[in-house]
Image (spheres, rainbow, N blue to C red):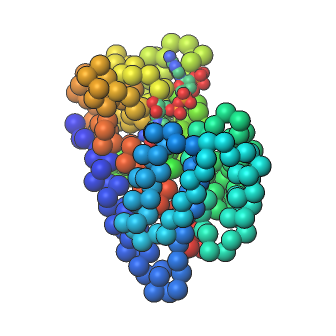
Amino acid sequence: MQLIDGKKISKEIRDELKAEVELLKKQGRQVCLAVIQVGKDTASSVYVNNKKKACAYIGIESAAYELEESTTEGEVLQLIDRLNQDNHVNGILVQLPLPGHIDEDKVIRAISPEKDVDGFHPVSVGRLWIGEKGFLSCTPAGIIQLLKRSGISIDGKECVIVGRSNIVGKPMAALLLRENGTVTIAHSHTKDLKEVTKRADILIVAIGKKQFITADYVKDGAVVIDVGMHRDENNKLCGDVAFDEVAEKTSAITPVPGGVGPMTIAMLMNNCVETARK
Ligand code: NAP
């Protein structure tokens, strides 16, 4: 069984990007990411900090906009409009979730698709599905890199994704299709989930339920990618997959932590650098 090392692969990508940013700077091209956070949600602050650190490591300038919880939707939209027009800013990221009085869809749609480094704008999503160049949603793009850089071929494989969220399941399906996988998406209405997941050569799990996928959901020799992120009864990080019992049946598997998690930021950084490659 191969343990897919997301920490190592993410570091590899960040180092490649760092070298590329140095070259871009020599050609007079800078990369600047604007990060907007509204309110002081603890988890969001951790994510924003990690993004700032990754930017600093790679040589990307980050401009942080830490706004009060009481900031109105109009004020956020005005800021985005200003950043859309600011030539110095290449990428704009709004940390989700936003406070309840702000419409997230409206905010996502306000970001210029040319600066949409999270890949959540409907234009980015459309470009992904029709195979046009555009920003890719970071977690699924990271999973493709995990597979490729671990020497796992997707072409012609039975790929099953459990979960159909806009940030993981759906873009994951589009990316696997682009890589010539045969793709099935399962969700909470899927009948006989085990029968579906057991068909998978590559099983991608994004259910959001702690250790839900046990060994009886997995075909012998399958590759299993666990997107889930939870705390177990001992407060240790764990995923949507019951790692210990599933790992022995697989040919390759991602651990939690140290699998998919570190890839999301690496791919966000890649999207930022992409703005300067154009
Ligand atoms: P989500 O929006 O809650 O979606 C969960 C999906 O799982 C839904 O499509 C749901 O089906 C499906 N589902 C729920 N129960 C099911 C069941 N019993 N059988 C089959 N399908 C079921 O979750 P998400 O945002 O995609 O995130 C999933 C997990 O990944 C979470 O643990 C999250 O924390 C983690 N995550 C990690 C990263 C990272 O960077 N590592 C990034 C994003 C998310 P319906 O659509 O029918 O309700």
* Residue 84 vs residue 138, the one in the foreground: 84
Q: Residue at x 48, y 21 (%)?
A: 196
- Extreme residue in the bottom direction: 27
Residue 59 visible: yes
Res 237 quadrant in image: top left
Q: Is residue 171 left or right of residue 49?
A: right
Q: Quadrant of the C terminus?
A: bottom right
Q: Where is residue 263 in the image (x, y as percent from the top left)?
A: 40, 50
Res 200 quadrant in image: top left
Q: Position of residue 8 (x, y in %)?
A: 28, 54
* Residue 182 vs residue 105, the one in the foreground: 105
Q: Position of residue 268 (x, y in %)?
A: 49, 56
Residue 122 visible: no
Q: Quadrant of the N terminus?
A: top left
Q: Which residue is drawn at 71% across and 40% down?
A: 102
Answer above or below: position of 216 versus 112.
above
Q: Residue at x 77, y 49 (%)?
A: 74
How many marks the image carries: the answer is 0
Q: Residue at x 32, y 48 (%)?
A: 6
